[in-house]
Each structure stands twice: as structure tokens, then as C-alpha cells.
Image: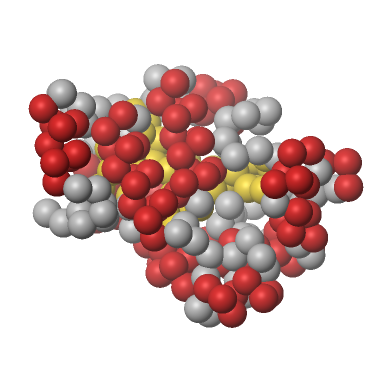
């Protein structure tokens, strides 16, 4: 099976992790939830465009790769709804002037996004009954009520989708792992403006914190529940 990191992570380094005993499958529990993280127009653009065109509209856009992932995210949302599993939407909250913090220094363009940019992409928007979780920092867990919602729903397994792979996805996966959830990451349902950061972070999450599969692979595994 071809992995997203093959050809980027040298084979000898992949062999080194295997030799050291890393990367075993962590499996799943019996009560999964789907996290759809930051799939907003600010990260995808209002329509599919190449990256350097997309950032003219929203400097936080990831360009075409977002729109390649969105149909798979939509398929996972439909699957979870059909099975009666929870779907939750952690998302970047609109920024006020007093929210700048270190973000204002590191990525000042992120503070100038218009209201439309914070809307959910229509193809993957939440239902009225689904939980939306505004966040101010990369992890969906940090400073939010996500853990409380997951406990209330009896969730033991998280499927994490959205963006960016190297930023909010990775931060959320690490925190999910740290809170002892089983974690699955569908590599074709997450996206990043950097293909190398995308691949390297998927490899690292697979070795340490999550099981990284295709969207179809995730669904096959969930079918066993």
C-alpha cells in the first residue's frame, strides 16, 4: 500500500521506526465521533483555485487541496449520520483585536479575515442539532468544552478530519491521544498548504498517536462496530 509519506520519508528512516517497535495499530473502541476541524471558507476559498490564486482571497487558504479533501469529509459526515454516530465541528472563531496574542505577531494576515471566511463550507456544514465548538488555538481541546461533550456522548474513538494537517489536526490528535481516545486520521480527508508538512506529520502521527488510513480504510474499520 502506498502511504502519503513514501518517497518523502526515506525508507531507512521508516525501517528505523519499525525496528524500534513504533507504529503499531491502536485500534478502535465502540463509540466513535467525527471531528470536522476548520473546514471553513478561510481555509478552502469560496471556490476551488490554485494555491497562489486562493490566497488572494483568503491568506489562510490551502487552495485546491482543500477541495480534493472536502468530498471525502462529506462522505464521512454522511456515514456517521447514517450510523447515528456523533459529528462535531471545532472551528476557528472570528478574531477580535484583543485576540491577537502571539498569532498577531506570527501570522498577522490571519487577523484580517472577513466574516464570510468563518462560515462553514456548505458541502460539509453542520446540522442545527450538531455540536459546533469555537476555538482560539490550534487544538480542538485547548480552552474548549470538547472533552465534556465527548464524555457526555460516551465517545471512545475519534476520526479527525479537516485542516491543517501540520497545525490544528496534529495538535488535536496529540491532545486526543493524551486524553486516551483511540484516534483515526483519514489521510485523504485532511489537508495542508504544504504537501511535505502534510506527509511528514501524517507519518509522525501514524508512528506515535493515531492510525492513519484512507477514508475507505476508516469506513471499513468502523463497519466492524
What residue sits 29% from the left and 43% below the top?
A: 203
Taking the image as drawn, is residue 121 in sight?
no
Residue nearest the observer in this picture, 114 or 104: 104
* Vertical order, 22 against 212 (above or below): above
Residue nearest the observer in this picture, 15 or 119: 15
**Side (left or right) of 107 relative to 63:** right
What residue sits 70% from the left and 47% below the top?
A: 106
Q: Position of residue 18 (x, y in %)?
A: 13, 31
Location of the N terminus (image quadrant)? bottom left
* Vertical order, 77 against 168 (above or below): below
Tell me the colour scheme of the image: secondary structure
Splitting the image into 4 quarters, where does residue 125 fall?
bottom right
Q: Position of residue 43 (x, y in %)?
A: 59, 61
* Vertical order, 207 against 62 (above or below): above
Q: Position of residue 210 (x, y in %)?
A: 32, 34
What residue sits 50% from the left and 78% below the top?
A: 50
Q: Position of residue 93 (x, y in %)?
A: 73, 47
Location of the C terminus (image quadrant)? top left
| View extreme (right): residue | 97
Splitting the image into 4 quarters, where does residue 204 fall?
top left
What residue sits 67% from the left and 76% below the top?
A: 56
* Vertical order, 163 against 12 (above or below): below
Residue nearest the observer in this picture, 148 or 137: 137
Q: How many marks?
A: 0
**Side (left or right) of 98 relative to 193:** right
Residue nearest the observer in this picture, 152 or 176: 176
Splitting the image into 4 quarters, where does residue 74 fall?
bottom left
Amino acid at each position: 500500500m502506498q502511504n502519503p509519506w513514501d518517497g518523502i520519508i526515506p525508507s531507512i528512516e521508516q525501517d528505523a521506526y519499525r525496528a524500534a517497535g513504533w507504529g503499531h495499530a491502536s485500534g478502535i473502541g465502540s463509540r466513535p465521533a467525527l471531528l470536522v476541524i476548520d473546514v471553513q471558507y478561510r481555509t478552502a476559498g469560496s471556490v476551488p483555485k490554485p494555491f497562489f490564486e486562493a490566497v488572494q482571497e483568503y491568506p489562510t487558504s490551502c487552495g485546491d487541496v482543500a477541495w480534493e479533501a472536502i468530498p471525502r469529509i462529506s462522505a464521512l459526515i454522511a456515514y456517521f449520520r447514517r450510523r447515528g454516530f456523533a459529528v462535531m465541528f471545532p472551528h476557528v472563531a472570528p478574531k477580535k483585536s484583543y485576540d491577537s496574542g502571539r498569532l498577531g505577531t506570527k501570522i498577522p494576515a490571519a487577523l484580517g479575515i472577513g466574516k464570510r471566511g468563518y462560515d462553514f463550507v456548505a458541502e460539509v456544514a453542520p446540522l442545527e442539532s450538531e455540536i459546533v465548538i469555537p476555538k482560539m488555538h490550534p487544538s480542538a481541546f485547548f480552552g474548549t468544552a470538547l472533552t465534556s461533550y465527548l464524555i457526555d456522548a460516551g465517545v471512545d474513538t475519534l476520526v479527525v478530519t479537516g485542516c491543517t494537517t501540520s497545525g490544528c489536526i496534529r495538535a488535536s490528535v496529540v491532545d486526543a491521544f493524551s486524553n486516551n481516545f483511540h484516534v483515526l486520521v483519514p489521510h485523504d480527508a485532511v489537508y495542508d498548504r504544504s504537501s511535505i508538512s502534510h506527509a511528514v506529520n501524517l507519518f509522525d502521527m501514524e508512528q506515535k498517536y493515531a492510525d492513519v488510513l484512507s477514508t475507505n480504510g476508516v469506513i471499513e474499520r468502523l463497519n466492524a462496530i
